[in-house]
Image: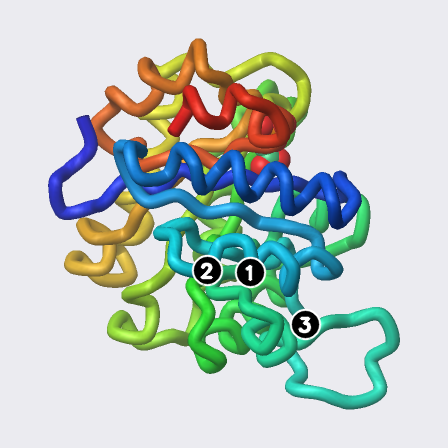
Amino acid sequence: MASALRRPLLAGNWKMNLTLTQSVELARLVVSGANTASGEVAVFVPFTAIAVVAETLKGSPVRLGAQDCYWEASGAFTGEVSVSQVSDAGGQMVLIGHSERRKLFGETDDHVNKKLGAALKGGLTPVVCIGETLEERESQKTWRVLETQIAGGLKGFAPADLAKVVVAYEPVWAIGTGKTASPAQAQEAHAFIRQQLKNIHEGFASGCRILYGGSVTADNVDALMAQADVDGALVGGASLKKDFLRIM
Ligand code: PGA
């Protein structure tokens, strides 16, 4: 069981799915289960749905986030969305450096670092995503990859600035594949990540929530959450279904 210092966070990442009507329906479903949830609940929705979902979530404990943000405040950056636009629409949190952003859109640790700076400055709670590919795991590079992503993504901040940061460990080989990391594999990686965070600051490391993501379902979430360093889950596919209620 994770430390009492850290309130569990169960987060749904809707990715590029759902119409506005479907988004409102799903948000209502999440609200219906949130009061009895065993931790904090959040949904990360497409930019276009933030405002309507914010309306639906009003008065509920469910937190709302965007799936990305840009680091500049405003200007000629066609297609990008700033932190202040996310908050203006009702977003309180933001995913940064999701592996799909890294793999499909060329995001680097440097981009992650700039986005993190913008999110913290703008008052959003950032969820920084890290994780190794299958090739990296098979060639024994997992620890080096995680170390590099943490060092690059989180560099240059004072520990006090990082207090709100959430980290999500999402092994790329487990995302959308149905191949979840075993509870032991997840714990091993989370403990390693917490050790890396300790190198930044002891107090930050013990309070920082580290979520597991990658094919989380209602059937495997309990065993994952039973691990000492697993403080929650970032759920993709299963967050679009009634399954998410059972996960909560
Ligand atoms: P998945 O996605 O649960 O569908 O594997 C997780 C994620 O990408 O955040």
Residue depicted at x 55% and y 74%? 87
Query: In the drawing, does residue 46 fall left or right of residue 215?
Result: right
In this rendering, the label closer to the viewer, 2 or 3: 2
Residue depicted at x 39% and y 58%? 59
Residue matched to label 3: 70
Residue depicted at x 32% and y 16%? 222
Residue matched to label 1: 54
The earlier-in-sequence mark between 1 and 3 is 1
Looking at the image, which is closer to me, 232 or 12? Answer: 12
- Say if 83 sits above or below 39 in the image: below
Residue occupying the far left of the picture: 4
Residue occupying the far bottom of the picture: 75
What amino acid type is highlighted by mark number 1? Ala
Looking at the image, which is closer to me, 206 or 93? Answer: 93
Kindly indicate the quadrant of the structure image that contains residue 10.
top left
C-alpha span from label 2 to label 1: 6 Å
Q: Is mark 1 within 8 Å of ligand 1?
A: no
Residue occupying the far top of the picture: 219
C-alpha span from label 1 to label 3: 20 Å
What amino acid type is highlighted by mark number 3? Tyr
Residue 58 image label? 2
Query: In the drawing, does residue 239 fall left or right of residue 106?
Result: left
What amino acid type is highlighted by mark number 2? Lys
